[in-house]
Image: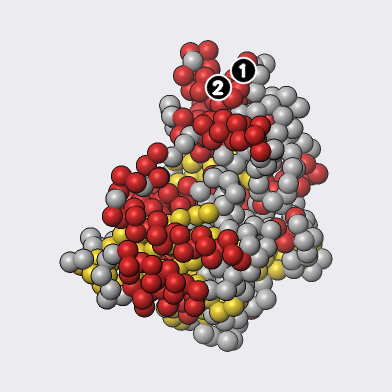
Amino acid sequence: MEDDIDPSMTLLNYLRSHVGKIGTKEGCGSGDCGACTVAIAELAQDRLRYRSSNACLTFLAAVHGKQVITVEDLKQGECLHPAQQALVDYHGSQCGFCTPGFVMSLFALGKNAANPGTAAIEQALSGNLCRCTGYRPILAAARAMFTEPAYLDAMPDAFERNQQQTRNKLRALQRAQPPQLHQAAKQVFNPRSLDELAAQLSAHPSARLVAGGTDLALEITQLHRQLETLIHVGEIAALKQIRVLDDRIEIGAAASLTEGYQTLADEYPDFGTLLQRFASLQIRNQATLGGNLGNASPIGDTPPALMALGAQVVLCQNKNKSQSQSPKLSRRTLTLDAFFIDYRITALQPGEFIDKVILPRARANSALRCYKISKRIDDDISAVLGCFNLSLVDGMIQHARIAFGGMAAIPKRASHCEAALTGAPWNRVSIDRAREALTQDFSPISDFRASKAYRMRVASNLLLRYFIEIEQPEQDSRVMQPTLLQRYTQNAVQSSAEGPVHG
């Protein structure tokens, strides 16, 4: 890759305009449709790990030392790859525009699961939209790819056979200095340690940090802004560590949501359920916990859950002002209540970055529940997201932490509601009083996702839902989640009766 290139260029534009690989399509430019899906392989403990990613939201600096695989790379000599052939055989393509994205999602799934079930297939395809064929033949093709001998016999593919060669190449790239992409006044840095990051951010305090980049890239693809200086933090091992200690869990700010999923789901199953509805698998493979906090969106999915758990952020910066001196790292720890200041504004100071997120371990007498309300189950943004974490002892509410997204300019705790619950008996009367107290906590706005009245009613009802589910676990609606195919059928029935259902 030449160094003289716009460092804010996306992988999608590079593939199409510089390499001539036009099989990767641009549909939405915002990571919603999946037409630009590619597979990215990287070394993880000396093994290759494959992830599906949205090329439209991936900065070039983020793929240094990794293998980028596009739909053009899959053909096995004169034969199609099983992920391609199955879609042909089961008529999974009509206009064909979205098909390369489906192919690459299935390819990546096949690299991570030998015989995935229906749920895993649906998760893998939840970030790919098809508007003309429908999902039945695509799902049939996916099931066939992993079960029928005609496709299984074509494995292992060339990528399996060439794994050792690929690992050797990636190891060599990791040892080499990353290219310093630049063009005119634009530049990008790829630090490999916290000291390097602190020094570069101290020297360039207005630089934009890139971890997953799934939100930052929208400034380019949707708002057409020019970003002069970027600092990519994805090669800093210390920022990707995940540690489970006796009293806490520490998750590095640059660890992807996919990497942190199992740890969080094991400790807090409802957090895991929430993460499964965080955008799409392609986004989760890139997005980070630190980034989701740093962009300070009032409708981010993870902040309310972290606030309900009493999580903290560790912030880090270089205290040596002279660039001639070695960096001297200084850290401070904040609660998320103190971290979020105003709409898209945090307590981060110039030159400061998020080092890690700290969560307490789960307690036996506490129950976390997270409820995401959106217009569709998969790959959608919240209208309201409520997270509830109450400690119950001998029929009394000992402690209450309740946080919402979509109800204010920042992710925010419901302090009046918490006060009404703390020390109160665990019964419907206490819950109803706390529901009334929510009106003192929030005055939401009306927008295209929901009206103010709807948001207030939903927030109140979610607290009641929490009470019902804790009291009557058999009423927990999440026990019987419909499959994607069932939801598709239900939507089709609803569509015929009420008009078209979009999304």
| Badge count | 2
Which residue shows up at 48% across the image and 34% down it? 483
Residue with the most extreme left position: 394
The image quadrant of residue 138 is top right
Which quarter of the image is occupied by the C terminus?
top right
- Determine whether label 1 and label 2 are within 8 Å by CB: yes
Q: Would residue 455 be found to the left or right of residue 470 on screen? A: right
Mark 2 highlights which residue? 140
Query: Residue 252's spot in the image, x, y percent?
Result: 44, 63
Query: Residue 492's spot in the image, x, y percent?
Result: 62, 32
Mark 1 highlights which residue? 90
Query: Residue 454's spot in the image, x, y percent?
Result: 58, 61
Q: Earlier in the sequence, mark 1 or mark 2?
A: 1
Query: Residue 263's spot in the image, x, y percent?
Result: 36, 53
Q: Residues within 10 Å of mark 1 (few under 14, many from 20)?
A: some
**At label 2, which amino acid type do we have?**
Ala
Work out how far the residue at label 1 is from the one at label 2, CA to CA, in angstroms.
7 Å
Asked if residue 142 shows in the view, the reply is yes
Which residue shows up at 57% across the image and 74% down it? 443
The color scheme shown is secondary structure
**At label 1, which amino acid type do we have?**
Tyr
Q: Residues within 10 Å of mark 2 (few under 14, many from 20)?
A: some
Which residue shows up at 28% across the image and 73% down it? 424
